[in-house]
Amino acid sequence: MPHPSRLAAAAAAFAFVALAASACAPQPEAGGSGPSGAASGSASAAGTPASCAPDALATKARGKLTVGTDTPAYAPWFQDDDPANGKGYESAVAYAVARELGFAKEDVVWQKVAFNNAFAPGEKTFDFDINQVSVNEDRRKAVDLSTGYYDVRQAVIALKDSEAAKATTLAELKGARLGAQVGTTSLDVINEQIQPRQRPSVFQKNDLAKAALKNGQVDAIVVDLPTAFYITGAEVPEAKVVGQFATTPGAGAKEQFGLVLDKGSALTACVSRAVDALRADGTLAALEKQWLSDAAGAPVLK
Amino acid sequence: MTFAKEDAPRDGTPSDKGGDTGRGPGQDKDQGRGPDRGPDENQGPDKDQGRGPDRGPDKNQGPGPDAYTPSARRIERERFKRSRTRRATAVAALSTLVTLAVLYVVVTGSPGWPRTKETFLDGEYARQALPLVLDGLWLNLRLLAVCGAVTLVLGLLLAVARTLRGPALFPLRALATAYVDFFRGLPLIICLLAVIFGLPALRLQGVPTDPVVLGGIALSLTYSAYMAEVFRAGIESVHPSQRAAARSLGLSSAQTMRFVVLPQAVRRVVPPLLNDLVSLQKDTGLVSIAGAVDAVYAAQILASKTFNYTPYVVAGLVFVVLTIPMTRFTDWVTARMNRRQSQGGTV
């Protein structure tokens, strides 16, 4: 016969485990999936203006808007690795969206969120995340994405004295050693449009891709066009923009960056509407002109 | 030298053999070796049972009319032991079932479970991920084979260099010690970054720029330092009397190392060495920092494209499955070594 006190101890242990596990289970969130911001050009009729007022919005911190982005925050999207200074395209867009929602500049709180954490299924630490995240259907299953705030084009950069720099067509890049950052559409562009003979190198950060380009470990790297102009202009002057891709693959004909929100977030409709309003009144175009280089400077690779 | 005790006289009195360990007292002598043993054969405490020459290899019952029959008390004792074993098994099974049930209910009943399930355990994404992950795994395996061989050899050389005697060899000892200290302490990721991005930046002729080769070099640098310490521990665990005996038999110090010390040392450290190899197998993925796509990185590429974590789970399971045969192999080697040590048969 097992000792009665030992049985009791075992039972207590099980009870404790069960209790502890249920105690640390979070409360189920109220509300199912909100309307996810389907890409629609016009302002959707979801939500009246009153429901998008700052005090009516269920933000993380009452009266504050918490915005996430990765660190380091790269130019030209941010400047001086400081998203809170309002400089750089994405920083400016975040403040414009906040203003559209009715938050003052000082009510915007920045939160460091690594790219991989932005789509983790747990509780989000931000109201929305702005981190050059391209919209696609797979991603919509995991998070809510706002309507697009920037139309992305991808570009190839190579060292000026390399073979790849002379390319004028996609076919001429087939033999090159190409690189791109992990999780970017740049990588999809390489695989789907260039289809190189050699497997592309995939880098954790653009910094490593730049280092490999300088060392000659890759012949060319693919990044989005504003980044390409920034790299060739400021960071790797010995490289040049070889050209841009006509259209990028994906859900639609054009690739767009969207703001990331928690799946079923109550804010999605309001944030999407704010982005649409900014596009309609020309704010986005003005900010693009102010912070990003003109895309006309790069030839299109056929 | 003492002599192992003879077995109980075979006259029908119950001896205490065969129930539990089957070992009489007083036969575990580690050093009392007969003079007829070879010099390289120091394992093996003496014969297990001190069997007489007329005994079969492992049976205690000699045939014949005076065959051993267990007493009633002994039969009773064995029955009691069996019943205790059965009950212990039953209790273990029950507690395991209860634990699993509690875990299952807690996990699947949690409010975030549906979301977690579709984020981590999605069949469709798993199907997409598996071929990509296996494709990347080929890189891990190639790196493991090459770096494993290189680190074992280099580690052994370093360990021998550190244990050399003699004042003239001081610089070699000091260099080996400095190397091991440095690379064992240097974080692997920094070693990888320095080698992969630093070496090509020197623009030296003949230096490889292939990130996989460079990554392999960085892994070998760090892991050979680990292995060197394991080998050194093995070498130093060989009793000084072994060396003394070998030298007194006229072996030179190199021969002593080669024929007496190293065979014992290496046998003793096989488990920790395999531990390091398993660890190396998992760390091969870190060369992906240079852009090469290994199994884990292939999973990350798909995961960050789709915002779904299932590929990571697939890659993790693939690695676990890969490690299992290695672990079994380790266990088998260890068991075989133990058998050899406790039997003292020829090695």
Image (cartoon, coloured by chain):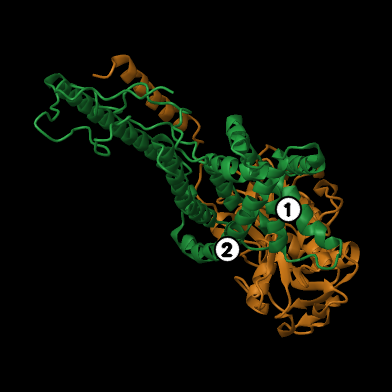
Q: Left or right? Give the position of B56 relative to A238.
A: left
Which chain is rendered green in the image? B
Compared with B128, B176 (above or below) is above
| Element under disc 1 | helix
Compared with A28, B15 (above or below) is above
Q: Quadrant of residue A174?
A: bottom right
**Separation (CA) of disc 1 from disc 2:** 19 Å
Numbered mark located on residue A101 in the image? none
Neighbourhood count class around disc 2 (C-alpha, 10 Å): few under 14, some 14–19, many 20 upward: many
Neighbourhood count class around disc 1 (C-alpha, 10 Å): few under 14, some 14–19, many 20 upward: many
Numbered mark located on residue B192 in the image? 1
Q: Left or right? Give the position of A150 relative to B311.
A: right
Number of callouts: 2
Q: Chain of mark 1?
A: B
Compared with B285, A136 (above or below) is below
Instruction: Give the mark toward the camera: 1 or 2.
Output: 1
Image marks 1 and 2: residues in contact by CB distance under 8 Å: no
- Percent across and percent down for residue A265 are 58, 49
User: Can the viewer see residue B274?
Assistant: yes
Compared with A124, A161 (above or below) is below
Q: Quadrant of residue A90?
A: bottom right
- Percent across and percent down for residue B12 are 14, 23
| Amino acid bearing label 2 | Gly
Numbered mark located on residue B136 in the image? 2
From the image, state the color of chain A.
Answer: orange
Q: Which one is earlier in the sequence, the residue at label 1 or at label 2?
A: 2
Q: Chain of mark 2?
A: B
Q: Left or right? Give the position of B212 relative to B96.
A: right
